[in-house]
């Protein structure tokens, strides 16, 4: 039999209650794309999901017993993915719907932590559906709405038909203040071309560079009152790899719970290739990326998205790693 | 019982076997109580039955009995067939001829793990956060809910209790005395495998953090074994309860439980280093042998007395996913991720 060794892409759908996750899910499943998806839905799913391979999940968030407090995984996902992989019938992707109040962190970390999950699947992207009408109100109600936006690779700014131009601008501004690196798609009734959201490779280190145009964009007006926000740092001076490792290791150890996501492209002193890395809380993945071209400006860039980030401190830390 | 691993024949030739291919991964395998049939649970919902006698004609594969994948398979403790659990939520009793009857259907849930106690004729199944115990009469008793999904389940030696592994430790229930509160043994983290020792004194678990945890039940003391490069999903106690065999090492790895126990001692590691890591380990039902299937597809037979091992199957790149001894210890059933099903005859 033909056993595919390639990893199955996993797309995570988050978003507040009523934002339109299930509508998006059903849209993905009903579209005539000829692809087969396994769907992992939460037990509090709002509407029925129409698919022959739906698994109910309990959202069991497990702390790893390794002394790292933010090191949490979704135990149910590990078990379900292992079970799904036993099936004869393979699928083109797995869609994971989280509850409206879920923290996307443990889901993302599962794909960094568990060797069996890593061997068989890859996290493709976190899609967050935002309810344009209620988002600002939801921000007041707790941390979930902003965390879901902070974690996102792709944001569906949904229900745009229910708000005025001005309101929409305000919501979009707020989203960008939290996370300027996610691609925002404005939608009504979660209607979107699937190419825009599936198979994006947002967690693929090799593709971090493809995100460069957005990724290296400067000049967002940050609202500095924001509790959850993103910060980026750039430099044309080469990075000392030992110092960087030490600093980043200590930083994530200490501040990991507050750093939701981090990404970086580094010009390591004397190295012919870019060094790319990304992290979710304390977990980090790193690899060599594309080689630098002759005459190209070797600039490094770091991005942090998190809560209560100390910009001055981070800036100093990064600068101490430069030659 | 004589399996002479020192015999040059054993080292130079592979033992006779029957090999049949399915086009879905093997999930688990088991021998029937009478040892006459080897069964292989498959990812397409089928359970393939093959005669243990490798010369006997194998019947054709039947229709799948489960709708999705079979998740677990054990010998029926009350007959000469099998019990199977699936991701279709059904727990089935399969007769020796392959015909299926439903014991329970838990809609929307998975029948994840199964265990049996042969003398008492009891079977146990994990279903979400609950554990079910099915007695000879087919009556189902429920235990739980546990604090998280039950990841593994096993009976005590005397069949009076069941142990369930979950997040945060294990829970031990007295089957006959429903009014008795369960005993909980806590250890932080998620426990993904569990085996009660063959003398009833210890319960071992494998954890999400690649450790092994073992509790002494009477004293409620515990110990932790570290240093594995992967999760230990397969545990097997030797028939005399002197050794706990563990997967996830390139050689046979056994923790000594005779005398004062393993505290402060290294595990005994023996045999030839195989390709990859052991993915499934199964102690012989009565003697000092152990079978280990590797994630590379290699299969070895080890003898803890002489500390030798021989290769029973070469690596082929497809991880061994199921391994079972016949009750008399003369046959092995072996399955892999590729759907290859093997019955090996060790009598020479």
Image (cartoon, coloured by chain):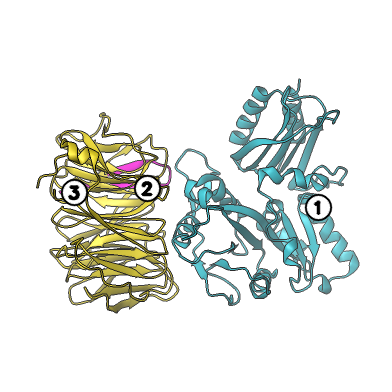
Chain colours: A cyan, B yellow
Of tags 3 and 2, the one toward the viewer is: 2
Residue under label 2: B297
Identify which residue is drawn at 16% across, 44% down: B241
* Same chain assignment for discs 3 and 2: yes
Secondary structure beneath label 3 = loop
Q: Do callouts 1 and 2 mark residues in contact (Cβ within 8 Å)?
A: no
Q: Residue B222's mark?
A: none
Residue under label 3: B284
Estimate the spatial distance between the alpha carbons at disc 3 and disc 1, rounded to whole Å.
62 Å
**Where residue B164 sits in the image (x, y, percent)?**
31, 57
Identify which residue is drawn at 73% across, 31% down: A313
Sort mark 3 into few (<14), some (14-19) or many (20+) by Cα contacts within 10 Å.
Answer: many
Of tags 3 and 1, the one toward the viewer is: 3
Q: Which residues are magenta?
A: B199-214
Relative to A5, A292 lies left or right: right
Estimate the spatial distance between the alpha carbons at disc 3 and disc 2, rounded to whole Å.
20 Å
Residue B169 seen: no
Q: Residue A176's mark?
A: 1
* Same chain assignment for discs 1 and 2: no
Identify which residue is drawn at 47% across, 49% down: A116
* Outermost residue to the left: B1
Q: Is residue B211 magenta?
A: yes
Q: Which of the 4 image quadrants contains residue A127?
A: bottom right
Identify which residue is drawn at 42% across, 68% down: B44
Front-most of residues B344 and A94: B344
């Amino acid at each position: 039999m033909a056993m595919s060794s390639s990893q199955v892409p996993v797309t995570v759908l988050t978003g507040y209650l009523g934002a339109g996750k299930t509508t998006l899910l059903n849209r993905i499943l009903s579209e005539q794309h000829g692809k087969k998806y396994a769907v992992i839905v939460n037990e509090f799913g709002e509407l029925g999901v129409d698919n022959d391979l739906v698994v109910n999940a309990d959202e069991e968030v497990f702390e790893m017993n390794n002394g790292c407090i933010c090191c949490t995984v979704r135990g149910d996902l590990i078990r379900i993915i292992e079970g799904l992989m036993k099936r004869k019938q393979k699928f083109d992707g797995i869609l994971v719907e989280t509850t409206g109040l879920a923290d996307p962190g443990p889901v993302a970390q599962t794909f960094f932590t568990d060797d069996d999950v890593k061997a068989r699947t890859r996290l493709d992207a976190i899609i967050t559906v935002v309810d344009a009408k209620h988002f600002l109100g939801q921000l007041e109600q707790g941390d979930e709405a902003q965390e879901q936006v902070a974690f996102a690779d792709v944001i569906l700014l949904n229900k745009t038909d229910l708000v005025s131009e001005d309101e929409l601008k305000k919501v979009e501004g707020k989203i960008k203040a939290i996370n300027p690196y996610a691609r925002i798609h404005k939608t009504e009734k979660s209607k979107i071309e699937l190419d825009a959201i599936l198979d994006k490779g947002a967690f693929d280190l090799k593709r971090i560079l493809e995100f460069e145009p957005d990724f290296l964009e400067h000049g967002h007006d940050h609202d500095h009152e924001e509790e959850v926000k993103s910060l980026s740092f750039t430099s044309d001076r080469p990075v000392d790899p030992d110092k960087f490792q030490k600093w980043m290791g200590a930083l994530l150890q200490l501040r990991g719970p507050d750093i939701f996501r981090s990404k970086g492209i580094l010009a390591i002193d004397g190295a012919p290739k870019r060094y790319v890395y990304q992290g979710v809380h304390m977990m980090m993945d790193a690899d060599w990326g594309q080689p630098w071209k002759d005459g190209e400006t070797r600039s490094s860039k770091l991005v942090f998205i998190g809560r209560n980030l100390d910009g001055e401190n981070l800036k100093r830390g990064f600068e101490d790693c430069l030659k | 019982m004589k399996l002479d691993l020192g015999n040059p024949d054993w080292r130079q030739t592979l033992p006779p076997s029957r090999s049949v291919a399915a086009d879905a991964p093997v999930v688990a395998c088991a021998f029937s109580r009478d040892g006459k049939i080897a069964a292989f649970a498959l990812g397409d919902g089928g359970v393939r039955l093959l005669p243990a006698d490798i010369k006997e004609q194998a019947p054709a594969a039947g229709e799948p009995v489960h709708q999705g994948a079979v998740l677990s398979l054990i010998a029926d403790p009350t007959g000469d067939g099998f019990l199977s659990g699936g991701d279709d939520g059904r727990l089935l009793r399969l007769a020796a001829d392959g015909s299926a009857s439903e014991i329970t259907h838990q809609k929307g849930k998975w029948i994840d793990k199964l265990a049996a106690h042969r003398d008492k004729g009891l079977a146990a199944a994990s279903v979400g956060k609950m554990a079910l115990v099915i007695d000879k009469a087919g009556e189902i008793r429920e235990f739980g809910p546990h604090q998280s999904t039950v990841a593994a389940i096993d009976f005590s030696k005397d069949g009076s209790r069941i142990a369930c592994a979950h997040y945060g430790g294990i829970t031990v229930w007295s089957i006959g005395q429903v009014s008795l509160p369960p005993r909980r043994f806590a250890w932080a983290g998620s426990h993904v495998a569990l085996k009660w020792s063959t003398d009833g004194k210890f319960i071992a678990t494998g954890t999400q953090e690649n450790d092994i945890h073992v509790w002494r039940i009477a004293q409620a003391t515990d110990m932790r074994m570290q240093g594995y490069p992967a999760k230990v999903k397969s545990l097997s106690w030797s028939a005399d309860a002197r050794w706990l065999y563990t997967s996830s090492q390139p050689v046979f790895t056994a923790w000594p439980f005779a005398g004062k126990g393993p505290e402060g001692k290294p595990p005994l590691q023996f045999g030839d280093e195989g390709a990859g890591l052991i993915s499934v380990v199964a102690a012989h039902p009565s003697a000092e042998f152990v079978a280990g299937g590797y994630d590379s597809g290699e299969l070895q037979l080890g003898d803890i007395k002489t500390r030798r091992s021989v290769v029973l199957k070469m690596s082929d790149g497809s991880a061994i996913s199921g391994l079972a001894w016949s009750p008399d210890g003369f046959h092995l059933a072996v399955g892999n991720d590729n759907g290859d099903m093997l019955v090996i005859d060790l009598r020479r």
